Image (cartoon, rainbow, N blue to C red):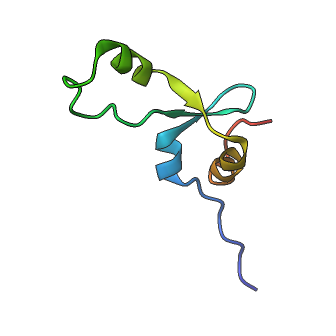
Amino acid sequence: MRRPRAIKTRKAVAKRFKITATGKVLRSRAGRRHLLQGKNPKRRRSLRKQVLVESADAERVLANLPFSHRG
């Protein structure tokens, strides 16, 4: 009989998303990598903040992170 496949974390997802203590999923905003001189300071400051992932997408993210501490 075949052994079951090991549960693995999708490392690309682990690098891009963070799970909060309450189980919500955070992501970084796009547009922070380069060409920052052309963006005004207010816009650059707002790009620093992390935002919540929509609930439908959060389920897909959490499915790829089996060892996250989501309760």
29 vs 20, nearest the viewer? 29
In the displayed structure image, the side of residue 7 where residue 32 appears, left or right:
left
58 vs 37, nearest the viewer? 37
**Residue 44, above or below 61:** above
Residue at 49 percent across and 51 percent down: it is 11
Residue 53 location, x and y as percent? Answer: 62, 38
Q: Quadrant of the C terminus?
A: top right
41 vs 32, nearest the viewer? 41
Residue at 52 percent across and 44 percent down: it is 14
In the displayed structure image, the side of residue 38 where residue 8 appears, left or right:
right
Residue at 71 percent across and 82 percent down: it is 2
* Quarter occupied by residue 32: top left
Residue 63 location, x and y as percent? Answer: 69, 53
How many numbered tags mark residues here?
0
24 vs 36, nearest the viewer? 36
Residue 21 location, x and y as percent? Answer: 71, 25
Residue 30 location, x and y as percent? Answer: 40, 37
**Residue 3, above or below 14:** below
Residue at 58 percent across and 53 percent down: it is 9
